[in-house]
Image: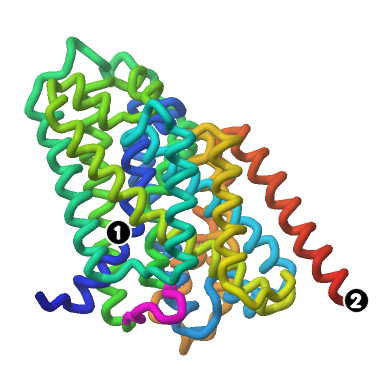
C-alpha cells in the first residue's frame, strides 16, 4: 500500500498525539470546570494550531537545528533558550509520566506504578537501541486507537445513561478561570504535532504545502475525536463521577453495559501510550542533544546516556506525582515552552514564513494564558522545576567557562 505524504504526515502526528489527553485528561478537566470543560477543548485546539504553525516555520528557517531549544536560542538568545529548554524537559517528563500512568490505569490497574515505570524503561531502551516509529507503524497505531475510541463513543451513546447524571441547567457555570484551567489540561491532547512540524534528523521532512494540509487536519481530527469522547464519558458518568475517575473511558463503558469492550479498550490504550511515549522521550532527548551541542550541558559521546536522563525524569515524575498532577505539570511546562517558541517565531523574517505573524502572536498570548491557568500545585511544581533546571544549565555553563 502506497502512503501519500499528506496521509503519512497525518498518521505520524496522530500516532504521537492521541494519548493521555484523550484517555485521562477529561477527569481532571471535569474536576476544575465541571461539564463546562468541553468549550475549553476548542480553545486548546486554537492554541495548538498556532503553536504548530510557529514550529513549522522555524524548522523551515533552521532545518538542521535540534528542535525548539535551538530555535529559541537562534532568535532570542541563550537565556530564553535555557528557560525554554527547562520548560520543555519539565513538560516532556510530565507528559511521559501521564502516558505511563494511563497505561497502568487501563492495562494493569492493580500495579499501575510498576507498569508505568516498566513501560518507560522498555520504551527508552528501544529508543537507545535505535528503534524508530515508522510511518507504517504510525498508520497502524492511529487506526487502532481511532477505531477503539469510535467504539467507546458508539457504545456510550447507544445506551441510555443513569437517571439524571448531570443537568446543565442545575450546574453553575465554571467561569473563565475554570474553563481556562480545563483548556490547559486538554492542551495535552494536541501536542504531538512536532512529530511532523519539527522532525528530528533522519525523520521524514514534509513540505510547507503538505503541512498546510496536514496540520489543520490533525488538530481538527483530535478536536472532533476529543469532543466526541468527552461528550460520551460526560453523558454516562456525569461531571462529578467523571472528575473522580482514574480511567474515564473504562468507567463509562462499565456504566453503559460495555464490559465486553474492556479488553479492546486496554489494547487501544496500550497502543496509544507506546506510540505517544516514543515521541515524547525522543523529543526530550532531542532537547538534551541541543544542550550538549551548545555547551549548556557537558558533551557526551554515546547516545544512550541521554536516553537514561530523559527516562529518569519521566520515572521520577511517575513516582512522585499522581497521574492528574503529572498531566497538569506536563501541559503547564509545554505551554511555557510554546510561549518561548511562539515569541521566537514572531521575529522570523518574512521570507522564512509560510504562516502569518499574527498566528505566532496569538499563540504566544494563548500559551502564557494557558500556562498561568494551571492548577496551583502544578504551577508551583512547574515554576520550581523551571528555576532549578535553568539554574543548573547556567551553573554548568559557568563551570565549563572557568575550567
The question of residue 111 being in magenta is answered with: no
Residue 357 horizontal/vertical position (percent) = 47, 73
| Quadrant in which the C terminus appears | bottom right
Q: Which mark is residue 403?
A: 2
* Residue placed furthest toward the right: 402
- Classify 10 Å Cα crowding around label 1: few (below 14), some (14-19), many (20 and above): many
Residue 295 horizontal/vertical position (percent) = 73, 76
Q: Is residue 287 in view from this perspective?
A: yes
The majority secondary structure of the magenta stretch comes to loop
Q: Which mark is residue 272?
A: none
In the picture provided, is 98 more to the left or to the right than 253?
right
Considering only vertical position in the picture, is 359 above or below 144?
A: below
Name the residue: 37% across, 32% down: 105
Name the residue: 21% across, 25% down: 235
Residue 60 horizontal/vertical position (percent) = 44, 83
In the picture provided, is 300 more to the left or to the right than 17?
right
Considering only vertical position in the picture, is 140 above or below 28?
A: below
Secondary structure of residue under mark 1? helix
In the picture provided, is 302 more to the left or to the right than 106?
right
Front-most of 321 and 307? Answer: 307
Residue 1 location, quadrant: bottom left
**In this figure, which colouring scheme has been used for the structure?**
rainbow
Considering only vertical position in the picture, is 21 above or below 367?
A: above
Front-most of 147 and 340? Answer: 147
Name the residue: 72% across, 69% down: 297
> What span is colored magenta in the figure?
198-206
Residue 145 horizontal/vertical position (percent) = 22, 49
- Classify 10 Å Cα crowding around label 2: few (below 14), some (14-19), many (20 and above): few
Amino acid at each position: 500500500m502506497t502512503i501519500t505524504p499528506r496521509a503519512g504526515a497525518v498518521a505520524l502526528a496522530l500516532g504521537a498525539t492521541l494519548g493521555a489527553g484523550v484517555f485521562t485528561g477529561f477527569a481532571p478537566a471535569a474536576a476544575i470546570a465541571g461539564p463546562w470543560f468541553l468549550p475549553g477543548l476548542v480553545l486548546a485546539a486554537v492554541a495548538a494550531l498556532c503553536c504548530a504553525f510557529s514550529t513549522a516555520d522555524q524548522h523551515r528557517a533552521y532545518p538542521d537545528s535540534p528542535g525548539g531549544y535551538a530555535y529559541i536560542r537562534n532568535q532570542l538568545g541563550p537565556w530564553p533558550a535555557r528557560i525554554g529548554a527547562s520548560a520543555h524537559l519539565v513538560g516532556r517528563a510530565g507528559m511521559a509520566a501521564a502516558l505511563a500512568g494511563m497505561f497502568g490505569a487501563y492495562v494493569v490497574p492493580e500495579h499501575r506504578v510498576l507498569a508505568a515505570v516498566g513501560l518507560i524503561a522498555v520504551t527508552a531502551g528501544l529508543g537507545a537501541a535505535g528503534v524508530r516509529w515508522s510511518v507504517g507503524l504510525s498508520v497502524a497505531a492511529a487506526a487502532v486507537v481511532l477505531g477503539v475510541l469510535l467504539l467507546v463513543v458508539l457504545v456510550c451513546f447507544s445506551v441510555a445513561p443513569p437517571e439524571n447524571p448531570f443537568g446543565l441547567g442545575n450546574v453553575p457555570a465554571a467561569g473563565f478561570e475554570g474553563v481556562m484551567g480545563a483548556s490547559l489540561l486538554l492542551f495535552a491532547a494536541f501536542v504531538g504535532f512536532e512529530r511532523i512540524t519539527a522532525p528530528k534528523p533522519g525523520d521524514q521532512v514534509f513540505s510547507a504545502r503538505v503541512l498546510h494540509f496536514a496540520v489543520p487536519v490533525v488538530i481538527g481530527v483530535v478536536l472532533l475525536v476529543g469532543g466526541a469522547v468527552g461528550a460520551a464519558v460526560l453523558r454516562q458518568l456525569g461531571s462529578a463521577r467523571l472528575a473522580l475517575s482514574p480511567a474515564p473511558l473504562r468507567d463509562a463503558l462499565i456504566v453503559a453495559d460495555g464490559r465486553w469492550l474492556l479488553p479492546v479498550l486496554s489494547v487501544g490504550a496500550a497502543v496509544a501510550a507506546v506510540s505517544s511515549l516514543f515521541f515524547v522521550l525522543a523529543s526530550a532527548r532531542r532537547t538534551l542533544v541541543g544542550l550538549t551541542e551548545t555547551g549548556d550541558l557537558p558533551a557526551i559521546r554515546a547516545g544512550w546516556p541521554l536516553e537514561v536522563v530523559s527516562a529518569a525524569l519521566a520515572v521520577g515524575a511517575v513516582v512522585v506525582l499522581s497521574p492528574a498532577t503529572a498531566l497538569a505539570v506536563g501541559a503547564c511546562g509545554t505551554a511555557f515552552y510554546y510561549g518561548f517558541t511562539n515569541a521566537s517565531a514572531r521575529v522570523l523574517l518574512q521570507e522564512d514564513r509560510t504562516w502569518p505573524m499574527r498566528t505566532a502572536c496569538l499563540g504566544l498570548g494563548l500559551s502564557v494564558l494557558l500556562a498561568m491557568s494551571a492548577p496551583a500545585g502544578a504551577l508551583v511544581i512547574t515554576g520550581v522545576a523551571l528555576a532549578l533546571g535553568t539554574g543548573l544549565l547556567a551553573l554548568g555553563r559557568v563551570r565549563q567557562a572557568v575550567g
